[in-house]
Image (cartoon, grey):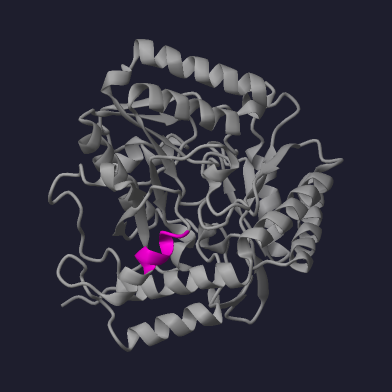
Amino acid sequence: MVEQSARLSPVLKQATPVLAARGEGVHIYDEDGRRYLDFTAGIGVTSTGHCHPKVVEAAQKQVGTLIHGQYTTVMHRPLLRLTEELGSVLPEGLDRLFYVNSGSEAVEAALRLARQATGRQNAVVFEGSFHGRTMAAASLTTSGTKIRAGIGPLMPGVAVAPFPYAYRLGMNEEQAVEYALAELDYMFATVTSPKDTAAFFIEPVLGEGGYVPVPPAFLEGLRRRADEHGILLVADEVQTGFGRTGRFWGHEHAAVRPDVVITAKGLASGFPLSAIAAPESIMERAWPGSQGGTYGGNAVACAAALATLEVIREEGLVENAARNGERLLTGLRKAAEGHARVGDVRGLGLMAASEFTTPDGSPDTETATKAHKAATERGLLLLTCGPHGNVVRMIPPLVVDADQIDEALALWSEALADASA
């Protein structure tokens, strides 16, 4: 037998060179003991910070009792308790839940539900959307061709409508909303009839597409059209949910109630767990056998999610996200002054970004990459996003405090100076 050494796929690329040894709160420590401010939070996952004591305690206790109770075979108390607790934070009327493991799985479950509940086949997504990497989720994703390239043909029945991205369109927000809604109506006349359209899928803030908040007027326009045509409005809250935007759910910044909510990432502080929620009148229209899975609703993940909810409530983390999110955005805007290559600073709550553009308005990926690298070298971990990778985003854990925000802003200001030199 020939001995061989296995390695990770060469396609996997790290955003930073850090080899993490441990995490605590908003910090990650490498194997040499160097401390980094982690403003990635595992792409918005470690909502209560790294290794919050209550989450650790809940998971450790559950591991010693029941690790896996497959919930279409047997039921377990952590899942029942979590379902009850989520009922108190979900939008009114969304009273039925189905659990899986990842955001992509939850998106696919929501699409399956929408098609079965309406008897229609088409879904409308919006430019810059990110809904996942599995085949149907990738078919709903337009944040970059890297998610879709080389795997076609993709799933049919997906129509892509303009997103009211005011900065890219060169419009103010009101103009961008008016334009995007008019184009959506034109799409109904030319691409997908409302009678064939099962659902709108939308992120309250574009994630991989560039951290662009959805204007409330646009969400409200979608709600009116959904009601008029019997279309389901699906809020993909994978990244925006659980307090990230300064409200418990990102869609709460608008006067809108979705028909389906998708949640994952910050739900269990790092344990793999996701869910879709819908009213019983919709969920009961799912076909028998269409909902299931081996690991969905894992007992340890559910215990961690219960602890996460407890921490969010006890420590006022939604309010903290709103308060320190405003501090972060204000500081980012101040840091951008004098740096012509930072064309736009935007965000909601602890979901903030700086977009880099050249003097003619083209994406400036090179400067964004330099700033990102310089921040890492100075001990601040960040991520890039956007179709051109020219947006640098900040996603600190919801436990971040004002001093840590100020420390990150100081490091970011230094990184900007390095990138501009």
Q: Is residue 169 visible?
A: yes
Residue 177 image-quadrant placement: top right
Q: Is residue 393 left or right of residue 344?
A: left
* Image quadrant in which you'd find residue 140: top left
Is residue 85 in the magenta section? yes
Q: Position of residue 51 (x, y in %)?
A: 53, 77
Let me know if residue 48 appears in the view.
no
Q: Which residues are magenta?
A: 82-88
| Picture coordinates of residue 297, whole percent (x, y) | 30, 66
| Residue at position x 56%, y 67% in the image | 312
Q: Residue at x 79, y 44 (%)?
A: 333
**Does residue 105 lie above or below 77 as drawn?**
above
Residue 114 falls inside the magenta stretch: no
Quadrant of the frame with the N terminus: bottom left
What is the tally of numbered marks visible in this picture?
0
> Outermost residue, right direction?
338
Estimate the x, y position of residue 128 in percent, counting from the top left: 49, 34
Indicate the quadrant where residue 391 lies.
top right
Query: Left or right of 368: which side holds 283?
Result: left
Q: From this viewpoint, which residue is outermost toward the bottom?
A: 64
Q: Is residue 280 above or below residue 272?
A: above
Q: Nearer the viewer, residue 8 or 314?
A: 314
Q: What is the magenta segment's predominant secondary structure?
A: helix
Can you say whether 347 is above or below 72 in the image? above
Task: Identify which residue, 85 or 401, lies in the foreground.
Answer: 85
Residue that appears at 66% across and 48% down: 352
User: Percent x, y for residue 202?
Assistant: 45, 37
9 displayed left or right of 204: left
63 and 252: which is toward the camera? 252
The residue lying at 21 percent from left, 46 percent from top is 284
Along the line of sight, which residue is nearer the eye, 160 or 175? 175
